[in-house]
Amino acid sequence: MELYQETIDGVSLVTVHAPRIDASGAIQFKDQMRKFTALGGDRIILNLAQVNFIDSSGLGAIVAAMKQLGKGQVLELAALSPIVEKVFRLTRMDTIFTIHDNVAGAFGPVQQVG
Amino acid sequence: MGVGVTIVKNKDPAFTPPDILRIRFGHGPGSVQNVTDRIIASIRHLNPSVDELGKLEIILAEVINNISEHAYQNQEGGVIEIIAAKRDKSICFHFIDSGLGLPGGRIPKHPLPSLNRPVADLPEGGFGWNLIHSLAKNIRYSREDGENHLFFQFFVDE
């Protein structure tokens, strides 16, 4: 599983380049997220646009990533596929995270640079 | 280990012919996806919606992961057998493994952990059976002759 981190206007955008976050990749995901979280940035947006499946282990790994945030940091999610969205909704984890329809929505007006 | 698919006439009265398929495989990295793909390919003729396929994929992944992690304690190669049979607008699944039994001999049915708590105390696990209970029907479990038998029904047209 590959995760890419970029900083845009002070916001940390982490993109998951994998079709699945599941039991076989959960630990790797958690470890990479820990490194990116340590880079700083108060707002971290996890771009899940390429992820079309997540299982309960993957969900647990995203919760773990939230729990390892530093003080003042927030983790938000963007671009959930229908199955990923369903897993979040059935476990009510959609009430814990701020979820954006897409990455552009996550950045909102901030992205409109003149 | 490869995935073997054969059409069988099963003697179990719960599975009236025609059976859809029977798969035996040694679990390991990637087996969840391979097996899920095979099963989903085998029910295409029932015209399931994308949403239904997604639900079925979630159930299958959680059940196989449970067997791998808990029954076989993450030791690769333990054999899992899946028999899937169409019945009206549903598919009856029967999973068999020879790993450790479920604790207490029964399916865990704990409610979703409360999320109304500090972030540091949020649960990182315990979602698997909740997802299975949410998406599958008529879930039954038995332990016989050192084997685990898990049955459930998935409705294609609800």
Image: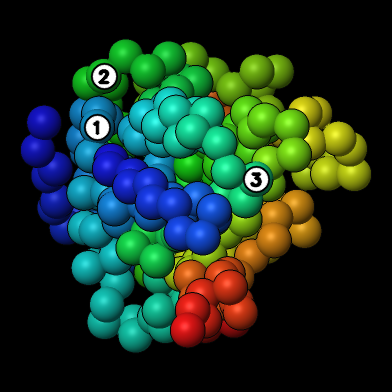
* Residue underneath mark 1: B29
Quadrant of residue B44 in the image?
Answer: bottom left
Please name the amino acid that badge 1 sits on: Pro
Q: Chain of mark 2?
A: B
* Residue underneath mark 2: B76
Alpha carbon separation for disc pair 2 and 3? 41 Å
Alpha carbon separation for disc pair 3 and 1? 35 Å
Alpha carbon separation for disc pair 1 and 2? 8 Å
Left or right of B6? Residue A5 is: right
* Residue underneath mark 3: A42
Locate residue B22, reporting x and y percent.
24, 50
The image quadrant where one finds the C terminus of chain B is: bottom right
How has the structure been colored for display?
Answer: rainbow
Q: Chain of mark 1?
A: B
Dot 2 crowding, Cα within 10 Å, few <14, some 14–19, many 20+: few
Name the secondary structure under disc 3: loop
**As drawn, which residue projects farthest toward the right?**
B116
Q: Is residue A20 above or below residue B106?
A: below
Locate residue B47, reporting x and y percent.
34, 85
Q: Nearer the viewer, residue B33 or B99?
A: B33
The residue sitting at 42% across, 83% down in the picture is B49
**As drawn, which residue projects farthest toward the front?**
A114
